[in-house]
């Protein structure tokens, strides 16, 4: 979600058409969801193979890859969905608010599951997401060529 909201904020700030923002966001979500899924499968497979010191089946790792794909895909829709229903200026603001809120809840959830500080986890998620948005907006403004 962090990379998606960062990219969408960066391209939306340039004033390009809503259709291009939606298309770019959808492509990013699919490509990154697939990439994260493949990374998850290969990582888990490599760990299993290393621990057993022999060839293992990749089928077991596929389940975690599918979970990663759908998790990334669904979370990517949070920053993209406002652009489907609203014009760019309003969509940008709502996308940022939705994303920061979702990251805050994710931080709270993560803190509760891990038994660590809920507030600290929430703050980290919100700040890091906010930095990604700032980077996207700054780069979008710098590279915006009429």
Image: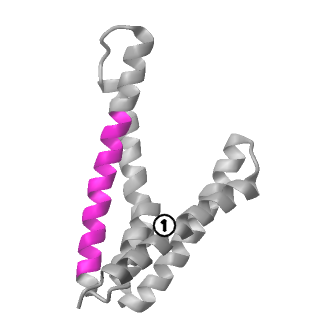
Q: Residue at x 70, y 49 (%)?
A: 111
**Residue 103 picture location, percent across and down:** 57, 63
Which residue extends farthest front? 142
| Residue 36 shown in magenta | yes
- Is residue 1 at all visible to an observer of this figure? no
**Residue 63 picture location, percent across and down:** 37, 34
**Residue 88 picture location, percent across and down:** 36, 88
Which residue extends farthest top? 53
**Residue 57 picture location, percent across and down:** 30, 18
* Magenta residues (range): 20-41
SS class of the residue under badge 1? helix
- Is residue 71 at all visible to an observer of this figure? yes
User: Which of the image's four quarters has the N terminus?
Assistant: bottom left
Query: What is the image's colouring?
Result: one colour
* Above or below 22: residue 57: above
* Above or below 67: residue 75: below
User: Which of the image's four quarters has the C terminus?
Assistant: bottom left
Q: Residue at x 43, y 69 (%)?
A: 5
**Displayed quadrant of residue 139:** bottom left
- Pick the front one: 109 or 128: 128
Tell me: 78 left or right of 144.
right
Judged by its main secondary structure, the magenta piece is helix
The residue beneath circle 1 is: 132
**Displayed quadrant of residue 13:** bottom left
Q: Residues within 10 Å of mark 1 (few under 14, many from 20)?
A: many
Tell me: 79 left or right of 31.
right
**Displayed quadrant of residue 48:** top left
Q: Residue at x 54, y 68 (%)?
A: 131
| Residue 143 shown in magenta | no
Q: Residue at x 68, y 62 (%)?
A: 123
């Amino acid at each position: 979600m962090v990379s998606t909201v960062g990219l969408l904020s960066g391209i939306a700030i340039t004033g390009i058409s809503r259709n291009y923002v939606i298309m770019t966001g959808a492509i990013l979500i699919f490509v990154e969801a697939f990439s994260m899924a493949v990374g998850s499968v290969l990582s888990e497979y490599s760990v299993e193979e290393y621990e057993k010191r022999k060839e293992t089946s990749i089928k077991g790792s596929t389940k975690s890859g599918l979970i990663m794909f759908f998790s990334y895909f669904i979370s990517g829709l949070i920053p993209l969905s406002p652009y489907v229903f609203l014009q760019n200026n309003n969509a940008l603001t709502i996308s940022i608010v939705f994303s920061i809120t979702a990251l805050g809840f994710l931080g709270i959830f993560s803190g509760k599951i891990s038994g660590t500080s809920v507030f600290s986890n929430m703050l980290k998620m919100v700040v890091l997401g906010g930095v990604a948005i700032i980077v996207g907006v700054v780069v979008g403004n710098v590279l915006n060529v009429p």
